[in-house]
Image (cartoon, rainbow, N blue to C red):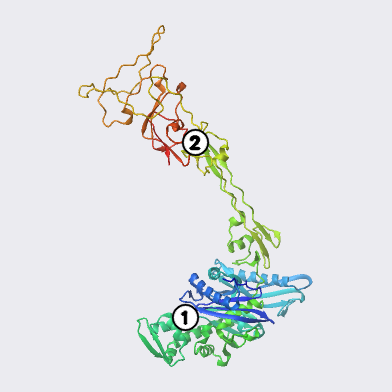
Amino acid sequence: MVKKKPQDSGLIFALDIGTRSIIGVAGQVTDERFQVLAIEKEEHGKRAMLDGQIEDIAQVAKVARRVTDRMEEKLDCALERVCVAAAGRALRTEQGSYAMEFPETVRITNDIISRLESGAVAAAESALGQGQEGERRFYLVGYTVAGYHLDHYPMSTLRNHNGQLLEATVVATFLPREVVESLYAVMEASGLEVASLTLEPIAALNAAIPADLRLLNLVLADIGAGTTDIAVCRDGTVVGYTMATIAGDEITEELMRRYLVPFSTAERMKTQMDEDTLTYRDVLGLEQKISGAQVRETVQQPAHALAGEIAQRVVALNGGTPSALFLAGGGSKLDGIREMVAEALDMDEGRVALAGNNYDITAFSDSYELNDPELATPLGIAVSAGLGLISDSYRIMLNGKPAKLFRSGALTVLELLMMNGYSSIDLLGRTGKNLSIMVDGQRMLFRGEPAVPCVLRLNGAEAAPSTVVYAGDSIEFVPAVSGAPAQRTLKDLLGADFTGGVTVNGRLVDLDTRLSTGDQVATSTRSVRSPVRPAPPPPRAEPVGETFPVERPREESPRTAPPRPEQPRTVPPKVEAPKAEPAPPELPAERPAAPPAPKPGPWEKSPEPVPTAGQRSLSTALQVMLNGKALLLPGKPEGAPYYVMDLLEHSGIDFEHLDRGVELQVNGTECAFTQELRPRDDVVIRYL
């Protein structure tokens, strides 16, 4: 598959995400006009948007991606950046003014104009915060300059003029955060980066009513499927925007109710009203026929309601009937709607027209017929971006790209970073996790690696997160890198030359074992790789240190044997021979046989052996169970205790070549090999 060339910096790609369809427009600026090179359109397969708001992000993203793919085929390049506009749902507009006075006359530069307009936008934001929705987070999607004054004299532009007192008034537009975030989510899911964002009525206005025509009192009503966006201009400036949630879908829904058809069928019927006969299939599966005149009659009531809503909004925003009105959007093609709007506004029908006649002032195409009112918004998005008609004086750059601004008064660097997906962890970083273990009963703590600090620069200089940002600022931010967690192995802890034994949480392990927080480490100087065997037993002694069955002495019949006394077993004292004539010690007489206790345990299978001459005293001998077998251990010098470690050589495990873990248990509980043993302990030493 041949890889497409990347999108050229001069190529403008715009998407109009509409309630009923998505329209793509691409082109470039030629001789101060936008040249359209490609147009694509596709309707949503299902109602993924309602009243201009994206409901099903995944579904809308699929359609946007298909439109983009077809555009890429036409343009033979990979589209990466897109210009979009947000619908005016829950739109809020506020007017703000700001003045700057200099001690002496100055030449007015772009930087001064930017600061002037920024102050006016901030004033509009302050007015927004005083309303009922002041606690809601709003997104500044655009603004238009309502007018400038230079030393109290009205001006259409200030650039390169000289003056001392400057004033600007703007009309700023705001949308709730969730409206704009869903639009960004769709673009991200489509694999596109948002290059610019504006408001749909602002974009449509820039295409349908260019700036040269705004000296007149003109109104644009963009009738979409879910919303109708309205913009009013006079005296050369835009004076306000508003929106109505009644639009083309209300007419479609009326057809659905009247003829019992699905939404898609009703949409088709709405476009075929001029035909003599319409054939359709209702939800019952029955084929029906109806005349176009009947369909036109059916839509009269919702169409009049739409025209009345438009008229009411226009009069409220404009303060009266305008000089002329342009209808744009797919809903403007509805038969009779132009006449209905003129009637509702009490205007001459000749003063209400479909948008499109003025597109050629700002746009042209050698391949497409642009005189279509449905192209007002997508073409306006492209024209606004290409000709620099989007007011971006209040733009802040973050790592070379325009930052998203959910504004509510003064904005700090930290707030801006969080609005753009970063968190306090990205700013501060985390120290790596500590490692805390217990070694032979002593707590040891190893610190994690410190975080690599972030890089934060504002306009090229280091800045604090609390620094307030202003229009035109540029932020460079490299997130902090969290430190690595502390890591240790037993070899790191004990040294590579450690030859003793070690357990972790009661299990024998090798020195390459990596430790985790909470581990219990126990060590012994006794090697488990070269276990020391005990000295061979003296002659005539029973074998010790090995597992062996112990025979019970012969017992008499329990019928004649006397009852066994209820007392603990004792080892008879050692019998010594006269000093003058040493002789082997006498063996003690056998104990009288006793009847066996019910269900005897392993400890009652045999009496304790009696030591012979030369043996160590068995007063400190230890008898335990090892892996289910009885094991008798001789007494240690000076009565020293036995530990689990002492049983390793009797377990049958080759500790010199361990290839897996070893389990240690005493009486069913995991233990360390340094645990002291008691008589009758049940010890387990086995492979896991």
In the rendering, at what x and y percent does residue 544 appear?
A: 40, 25
Residue 400 horizontal side relative to residue 592, left or right:
right
> x, y (%) of residue 165?
74, 73
Marks 2 and 1: in contact by CB < 8 Å? Answer: no
Which mark, by number, is residue 656?
A: 2
Residue 647 in the image: above or below residue 83: above
Residue 226 visible: no
Left or right placement of residue 394 versus residue 162 in this view:
left
Nearer to us in this view, 306 or 378: 378
Q: Position of residue 277 (x, y in %)?
A: 42, 91
**Residue 249 bears which disc, if any?**
1
Secondary element under disc 2, as helix, strand or loop, is helix
> Left or right: 452 with respect to 106?
left
Viewer-nearest residue: 531 or 674: 531
Please tell me the numbered disc located at residue 574.
Answer: none
What secondary structure is found at the residue carrying circle 1? Answer: helix
| Crowd band around label 2 with a 10 angstrom C-alpha radius: few (<14), some (14–19), many (20+) | few
**As shown in the figure, which amino acid type bears the numbered disc 1?**
Asp
Q: Amino acid at mark 2?
A: Glu
Q: Quick one: quadrant of the N terminus?
A: bottom right
Relative to 524, say whether 588 is above or below.
above
